[in-house]
Amino acid sequence: EPEVTQTPSHQVTQMGQEVILRCVPISNHLYFYWYRQILGQKVEFLVSFYNNEISEKSEIFDDQFSVERPDGSNFTLKIRSTKLEDSAMYFCASSEASADISKSEAFFGQGTRLTVV
Amino acid sequence: QKEVEQNSGPLSVPEGAIASLNCTYSDRGSQSFFWYRQYSGKSPELIMSIYSNGDKEDGRFTAQLNKASQYVSLLIRDSQPSDSATYLCAVMDSNYQLIWGAGTKLIIKP
């Protein structure tokens, strides 16, 4: 069964360093997303990406964050100058292209646990 | 501020009984509603989606939507211990962003 894969599963970084989280969406999906979940808290939307550009982003997704699709399969989230409060699980998700985007069902990868020390 | 509210639980249900999970949302323009299951330390797993008023059944799961009351629920029939997890309600708002509830922790007691 096709799945979204994320690497690494766990990343520890020092405060102020840059991290890149990697995702391989399901191959025939065209919408890509990043979410985060701070331990014990709600899942939070960060950004959606379609047709090689950001389609929506939340208030959380400020200049510290960027996304890229460097090739035909990978989708990355870069966090510059990490802060302690960036520690969270980061989930990548993807969904099929649909005539009605509101009916796009998102499938999640297993997540990257980012720990900033 | 768009909100999705769920009772955090835990909701304890005997094995074999029906578990009923509820969710309310604030954005009246929301069109799409999703239930995800999340085991501790794992990623959300899509269980059901529902887009129109009424019931939608898939195996042991039934999703119910009432847009007038801004209410969506999930029923799990013949509950199994493996159903023990946190159930997340997610609502797609008018900007096509998924807004998530905090989840209801469900415990199925053997």
Image (cartoon, coloured by chain):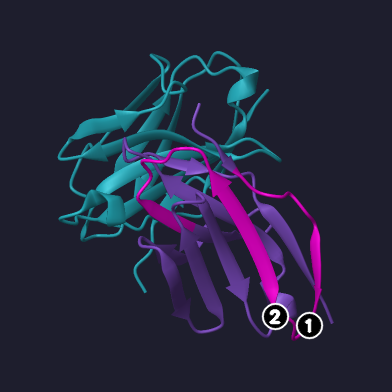
Chain colours: A cyan, B purple
Q: Label 2: chain?
A: B
Q: CA distance from mark 1 to mark 2?
A: 5 Å
Specify whether disc 1 shares its chain with disc 2: yes
Q: Is residue B75 above or below residue B44?
A: below
- Of the two numbered discs 1 and 2 on the same chain, state the one appearing first in sequence: 1
Which residue occupies the foreground of this view, A86 or A49?
A: A49
Q: Position of residue B45 (x, y in %)?
A: 51, 62
The amino acid at mark 1 is: Glu
Q: Residue at x 24, y 60 (%)?
A: A27
Q: Is residue B39 above or below residue B27?
A: below
Q: Which mark is residue B79?
A: 2
B95 lies left or right of A36: left
Q: Position of residue A35 (x, y in %)?
A: 46, 39
B16 lies left or right of B77: right
Which residue occupies the foreground of this view, A106 or A89?
A: A106
The amino acid at mark 2 is: Ser
Q: Is residue B77 above or below residue B67?
A: below
Region of the chain picked out in magenta, as a range: B5-34
Magenta stretch holds residue A25: no
A56 lies left or right of A8: left
Q: Label 1: chain?
A: B
Q: Are marks 1 and 2 in contact (CB under 8 Å)?
A: yes
Q: Residue at x 53, y 58 (%)?
A: B72
Q: Position of residue B84 (x, y in %)?
A: 72, 69
Identify the element where label 1 is drawn: loop
Q: Is residue B77 above or below residue A65?
A: below
Q: Residue at x 30, y 45 (%)?
A: A32
Q: Residue at x 65, y 62 (%)?
A: B21
Which residue, given by chain and number where applicable, does mark 1 sit on? Answer: B15
